[in-house]
Amino acid sequence: MTVLVLAEECDPTADAVVHALQQREVPVFRCDTSWFPVRLSVDAVLGETGWAGALRTEHQEVALSGLRSIWYRSPTAFVFPGGLSGPERRHAALEAKLGLGGVLWSLPVLWVNHPAKAADTYKPTQLHVARRLGLTVPRTLVTNRPEAVLRFAATCDGRVVVKPLGSASIVEAGGRRPLYTRPLNADDLVDLHGVEVTAHLFQQRIDKACEVRLTVIGGRMLAAAIHAGSDAARADFRADYGALTYDTVDVPGPVAAGLRAFMRHFGLVFGAFDFAVDEAGTWWMFECNPGGQWAWIEDTTGLPITETLVDLLQEGKP
Amino acid sequence: MPAVPALGPIVDTADRFALARPHTSHTGSDEEPSPPGVRPFGLRFAADPLTGDAPLPSWRYDPERQLAVDPGNGAPWYRSLVDMTMKTTGYSTDGGSSTGNEEYRPDYLSEESA
C-alpha cells in the first residue's frame, strides 16, 4: 500500500518525509498537481466499491486502490499547455480540480489533512470552537467599526493587540512585509482610520511567560516552549528569531483534552497550534494552522515530528 | 466536554481543494501602499520588508527518487538546508523568517500574477 504525497518539487519538508518513508521501505507516489495534465495523468472508473484506476507519471504509477494515505502537503496550481485562452484555462482548471480532486477526495484513505476540512478552519471559527470545547482563548473582537475597537479596548484596560485574520505578510512595493501581532498603545487608538476598510481582529493582550508551538499528529502531541529574549519576540516570536530559545514542555491534561476534541470537531489529524502561557500557567490558544511548518522547531528541540507524521502516513489511520 | 454544533462549509468549491502558488516562481507586487485613511488599519503596522535571506542552494528534482537532490553529488537536497538551518531559506516551505508558508492561502490559478 502506497502513500500519496501531493507536494511541489521544491519542498524540503516533503523531501524529508518522502525520504523517511523510503527508508522504512514504504511505497511512495509523489506528485504535484501542477504536473497535471502534462506530466501527470489520471484514469478512474467508478465501480461497485468506488473509483478504480491509476495515477501515472513518466516514471511512476500507482493504483488508486493501492493507496493507504494521502498527504496534502501544499500542491500547486494546475499548469496547462500553451495556447489556451484565459477563459479556456479557467474552464480547464475547474474541470481538473473537480475531476482529479473529486476522485482523490472520494478515496477511502487517511488524508493529512483533508483539504476541505482544513479549509473550514477560519480563525474566528477556530476560536469559537476552541472556547466551546473548554480551551482558554483571549477575548476577541472582529470588526470594521472604530467605535467598537474603543469599547473593546476599554474592557481590556487598553491592553489589546491587532493581528491579521489570514495572511501573515503582504507583498507590496517589491518586498514582502510581515504582519506581526502588534500591541496597540494609547496613541494608536487615537486614530483608527482604516479599521472601516475591512474586517480586523483585535484581542486582549496576554502577558506571556512563554509561547508554545504544539504540533498534534494523530493522537500525539509534541510541544515546544518558545522563550522570547526581546520585546519584539515577546509580542510575536516570528519578529525576532535570533532572540528565541526553545525547550520541550508537557501539555496539561485539560488542554490536551480540548485539543483532541478540537481535532475531532474539524476532522483534522495534523495541526500546528500556537499558545501563549501566562505567569499563572494558563494556556491561551491563539490559532491552529492545519498546514503548519515544523522543521524549524524539530531542528532546535529534537521533537520527532517528522517521524511521527511518517508513522501516521504509514499506518493509514489516526 | 460540551458538544459544538457542526458548522456547514464556509468556503467555496475551489478553496475546498485549494492549490497554492508555486513558491519557486514567487511574484510580488510593485504597488505602493495607499495613503493613511485608505489603507486598512492592520497594515499600518506592517514590518519593514524582509531582507538578508540566503538564496536556496542549487537543486534538481530526481523523478526516480521523488525528491530534490544536490546536482553535484546527488545527495538529498533537504539535508543541505538543515546544515544551513531552516531559517535561512527565504520563501522556503518550512518556517524561517519569511513566514512565507505559514499563512492562509486562497486558491490560486497559474495565470494570476499577484
Image: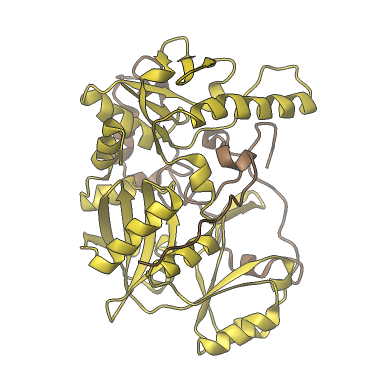
Position of residue B60 relative to residue A243, above or below, is above
Task: Locate residue A97: give its quadrant.
Answer: top right
Give left or right: position of A190 versus A178.
Answer: right
Is A12 situated above or below A210?
above
* Position of residue A300 measured from the top left corner of the image (x, y, whole percent): 25, 52
Question: Quick check: can you spot residue B62?
Answer: no
Chain identity for the colour brown used in the image: B
Residue A278 found in image quarter? bottom left
Image x and y of residue B45, in percent: 59, 68
Residue A162 at x, y percent in the picture: 55, 72
Residue drawn 75% across the image and 16% down it:
A83
What residue is shown at x 27% (from left), y 28% (from top)? A21
Residue at 70 percent of width and 65 percent of height? A198
Chain whose colour in the figure is yellow:
A
Q: In the rendered view, tell whether residue A92 sits above or below residue A265.
A: above
The image's colouring method is by chain
The answer to which of A214 and A300 lies nearer the viewer is: A214
Task: Name the image quarter holding the C terminus of chain A.
Answer: top left
Q: Quadrant of the N terminus of chain A?
A: top left
Q: Position of residue A128 (x, y in %)?
A: 50, 66
